Image (cartoon, helix red, strand yellow):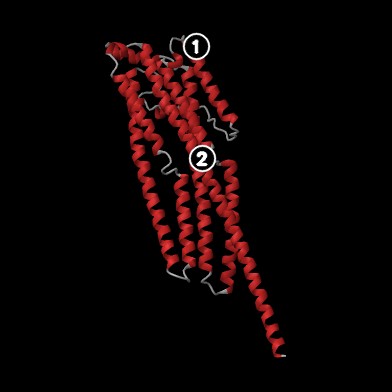
């Protein structure tokens, strides 16, 4: 039997590393939780943004309605929409926050880095016994769980233990294998470094294009509003509608982080190319040394760690600002409705008093 075939047969017969299985399992927990939380976060905010825009649109439309009963129905809808928006935001603040999905994503990538170092036997795992390496990897899993607990994220993330864990690991490993065997440096360069560099470059292009397209649409809508405002009186309702639409489009773009990340990815990609260059100019005998390989891998993982840290800070900062803007807009809508009520009452009061004044003058 050929040597390679024999090695593959031995790999199939070998029991999976329990520490590695545990680390992968937690990464899968965080990965799935992050994906689900992000979806919920975006869906709830999108509904609130739509309700906010509908409030303005219906308010504008109601100014053209002369039928009393229809105006009353629209008035009721205008009262209910901001209340519904606030209720959704309160629910989302508890069960679909703008931070949870980010922290789960950060934690999953931290574990991916540790799993990579463990499989390479480099970084903190260099020159340790198999037992010590397993202990260290499990400690990293414990630290990841503690990180989530310390930030007060109460939503559960554990998934049930099932028989297809190996299939799930294979689906998220990103290394062209089952995610369990030791990695070579060539594997690392191909599946971790070059693959991530390609992802960065593609993501830079996609994010920049999305941001540019989104901004162009928002600027166009705002320009139409400005043009309507300069054309004279009678178009105020349309100006309010375009302003509301521009606001809604801006908030939609921000919850998707358009334009917020490409600069971070650009910096990380540039650093990664430099590290690859530094590695390639080393003499061949130096590149064969385990210590040099470990130093290179640690530097590259630091690039990924720094990128994730910057991404987390930028994402949280932008989403929190967006959250405040949405809430303020809802509050302004409720206050506007209140002002409209007071104005309507004042008008009715003046109409009721006007006949008395006329009658007095005639007398």
Counting residues from the start of the chain, the first of labels 1 and 2 encountered is 1
Residue lying furthest bottom in this view? 363
From this view, report whether residue 301 is shown above or below residue 313. above
Determine the residue positioned at 39% across, 57% down.
Answer: 220
The percent coordinates of residue 44 (x first, y second) are 52, 47
Residue 240 seen in render? yes
Q: Residues within 10 Å of mark 2 (few under 14, many from 20)?
A: few
- The disc label shown at residue 5, or none: none
Q: Is residue 40 visible?
A: no
Return the residue nearer the eye: 1 or 44. Answer: 44
Mark nearest the camera among 1 and 2 is 2
Residue in view at x 29 percent, y 10 percent: 285
CA distance separating discs 1 and 2: 39 Å
For label 1, the SS is: helix
Q: Which residue is mark 1?
A: 132
Which one is nearer the viewer's eye here, 258 or 125?
258
- Residue at the image point whose x is 60% and y is 62% from the top: 337
Residue 317: percent from left, percent from top: 51, 40
Residue at image coords 60%, 50%: 87
**284 to the left or right of 23:** left
Badge 2 element: helix
134 lies above or below 222: above
Q: Is residue 12 left or right of residue 316?
A: left
Q: Mark 2 — residue? A: 317
Tag 1–tag 2 contact (CB < 8 Å): no
**Of 79 and 257, the residue lying toward us:** 257
Q: Is residue 198 above or below residue 45?
A: above
């Amino acid at each position: 039997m050929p040597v390679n075939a024999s090695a593959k047969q031995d790999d199939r017969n070998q029991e999976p590393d329990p520490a590695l299985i545990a680390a992968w399992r937690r990464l899968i927990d965080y990965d799935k939780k992050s994906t689900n939380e992000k979806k919920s976060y975006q869906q709830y905010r999108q509904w609130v943004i739509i309700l906010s825009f509908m409030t303005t649109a219906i308010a504008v439309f109601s100014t053209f309605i002369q039928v009393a009963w229809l105006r009353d129905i629209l008035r009721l809808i205008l009262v209910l929409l901001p209340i519904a928006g606030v209720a959704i935001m309160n629910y989302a603040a508890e069960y679909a926050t703008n931070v949870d999905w980010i922290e789960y994503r950060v934690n999953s990538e931290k574990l991916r880095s540790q799993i990579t170092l463990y499989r390479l036997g480099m970084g903190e795992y260099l020159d340790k016994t198999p037992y010590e390496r397993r202990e260290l990897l499990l400690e990293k899993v414990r630290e990841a769980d503690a990180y989530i607990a310390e930030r007060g994220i109460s939503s559960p993330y554990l998934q049930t233990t099932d028989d297809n864990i190996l299939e799930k690991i294979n689906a998220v490993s990103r290394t062209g294998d089952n995610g369990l065997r030791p990695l070579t440096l060539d594997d690392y360069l191909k599946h971790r470094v070059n693959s991530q560099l390609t992802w960065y470059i593609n993501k830079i292009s996609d994010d920049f294009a999305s941001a540019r397209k989104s901004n162009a649409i928002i600027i166009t809508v705002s320009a139409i509003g400005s043009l309507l405002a300069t054309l004279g009186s009678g178009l105020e309702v349309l100006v309010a509608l375009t302003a509301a639409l521009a606001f809604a489009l801006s908030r939609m773009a921000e919850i998707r982080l358009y334009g917020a990340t490409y600069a971070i990815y650009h910096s990380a990609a540039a650093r990664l190319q430099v590290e690859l260059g530094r590695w390639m100019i080393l003499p061949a005998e130096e590149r064969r040394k385990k210590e040099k390989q470990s130093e290179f891998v640690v530097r590259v993982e630091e690039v990924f760690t720094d990128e994730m840290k910057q991404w987390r800070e930028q994402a949280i900062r932008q989403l929190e600002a967006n959250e405040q803007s949405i809430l303020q807009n809802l509050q302004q809508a409720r206050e506007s409705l209140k002002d409209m009520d007071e104005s309507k009452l004042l008008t009715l009061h003046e109409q009721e008093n006007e006949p008395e004044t006329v009658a007095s003058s005639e007398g």
